[in-house]
Every structure is written in structure tokens, then in C-alpha cells.
Image (spheres, rainbow, N blue to C red):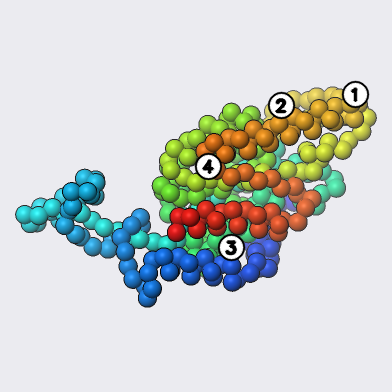
Amino acid sequence: MAKSAQDLQRRAESIAVPFPPLLIAAQRVAASVFQGVHGRRRSGPGETFWQFRRYQPTDPVSLIDWRQSAKSQRVYVREQEWEASQSVWLWCDRSPSMEYLWKEVPESKAIRAKVWLLALASLLLRAGEQVGLVQYGGKPLRGNGALPRLAEAITGQDAIPQISTPPRMKLPRHAHVVLISDFLEPPGDLEDIIKWFAGQGLAGHLAQVLDPAEETLPFTGRARFTGLEGEGETVIGRVEAVRADYSKRLTLHRENLSAITSRTGWNFLSHRTDRPPEMALLSLYLTLSGSLGRLF
């Protein structure tokens, strides 16, 4: 059964609520201290104009404001105000494989991925960060009204066919990207995407969501497996006979994903839908906030 945007938002907020507000407040204090006490301003990466100043020999030519310079005999550069908040861009897989649901599990990978995305967005917004969706681009959102808009956006695309990798969208340099998926496609396809984002100067995090049946292959006897994305059918005479090999292949697949992310300075973590989402959210949030802290 499809869940409405309001249902997903309530679920995500209920998961995010138990996290210590002090932890979130501490991050903002740390960012404020780095900027300087009493709101002292400084130049740096940001979108808000601060001031014009005289060009120095060490300044990149790209910073010169030619219009302002044309008004006098001097050359000026345009400075933006440094902003402590970072933009974090989220994406969750909407492809058919995410709809897989074993009978022993209360919700599909698709639902868990959406809840995970919105719960993470809730924490980030409470921390003062800017949050956007990869598939939309544009400007990221911030403030109290952002979460309902994000919830509406990810539920409003359910009728649109989705591929299992994120679109290659131009995002702000030094932003962070969080990709949530089962990541069961060939590692080479994922590596191309990761390298493309990393090549833009983006820090990234892969959050894998799996159904427990995909990890343990709990079936017995003869079984027919049907691919959810056009892979066709496979009949196995005795599932028990292939379980060990299947486990080894899945372990190798994860090791490949971990190696790919390590080579680009990204992070990888995995989560099962039969386990509470809170611990996975905490792990992802602390990993992400640690990276944000290094930028601060």
C-alpha cells in the first residue's frame, strides 16, 4: 500500500525525535565559533554578496568584477559571505527492485529508503543545514517548511518510472551527496556515477538498504526467482545447495562497493529492513556530520 507524504513525514519525524538536540545544537555552536563570535562576517564560499575589495596579485582572475572595476581606475573583486551551513543532496532509489518485500518483514525497501531519507533530512534541517533532492537540482531547502515539501516531492514521483542510479546533475561544489539504494547493480556502473559526482568536488555517502531475504536466502527446496527489472526467471532445484555461494557473492559485492567508495573518499554503510531504522540513521548521521564538521 502506498504511503502518503504526510504518513512518511510523521514516521520520519518520529524516528528523528529521539536524537539528542544537544548534539545538533553543538554542531551549530561549533560552526558559529569558527565564523567568529558575535556574528562576525568573513569572506568565503556562499551565495550572499558581502563586499567589493581591491584586487590582490594572489587573487584568481575569475573573482574580478569587471563591471565594478570599470567604474574606476582600480580593479575590484567581488566577495561572497562565508556560510557555515552546507548543502546536502539526497537521493533514494525508486526502481522496481526496491519494492521487494519478504513476508517476514513489515515494509519494503522503498518505504524504508524514503523514511530514512526524510528522517535524515529532518535531522539536517534541525541542525540548520540546507537539504535538496538530487533529481530536482535547483536551490536546496532550509527551515521548518522544508520537510513537508521534501516529503511531497519523493511521494509525488511514484507513478514515474525510475532507474536504479541517480541522474548526473550538476550540484554545488563542496556539497554532500547521500545515495540510498539496494545497490545490486554491477559495481562498475556505480563506480562511474560515484566518480562523476566526486569529480565535481562532492563528498558522498552510499547507504544500502536490503531485505533480509536478499541477504540470508532463507528459502528451501525448489524455488522460482523472478527478476523485478526485466532479468527474467531462474529456477533453482535446491536453494540450500547455493546458499553458501550466494552469501560469498553478496559479501564480495559489498566489499567491491566499499572499495569503490574508499578510493574516492566516500563512505559506505548497509542496513536491513528487519532491523530498527534508528541505529542506521544514527550511523549515517554521525558519518555525515563528521564530514560536515571537517568542512567547518
**Mark 2 surroundings: few (<14), some (14-19) or many (≥20) residues within 10 A:** few
**SS at mark 3?**
helix
Query: The residue under label 3 is which amino acid type?
Result: Leu
**Mark 4 in CB contact with mark 1 (< 8 angstroms):** no
Indicate the position of residue 193 as horizontal and vertical percent values: 53, 35
**Between disc 4 and disc 1, whose residue precedes?**
1
Q: Which residue is mark 4?
A: 265
Q: Nearer the viewer, mark 4 or mark 3?
A: 4
Instruction: Inspect the image, locate mark 1, and give the three-letter code of the amino acid beneath it.
Output: Gly
Q: Give me the disc on residue 231.
A: 2
Who comes first in sequence, dot 4 or dot 2? Answer: 2
Mark 3 lies on residue: 123
Query: Does the image show residue 263?
Result: yes
Specify which label sits upstream in the sequence, 1 or 3. 3
The image position of residue 201, as x and y in percent, is 43, 43
Earlier residue among tags 4 and 3: 3
Residue at 38% of width from left, 66% of height from top?
35
Q: Amino acid at mark 4?
A: Gly
Please name the residue that numbered disc 1 is placed on.
237
The residue that appears at 71% across and 47% down in the rendered structure is 271
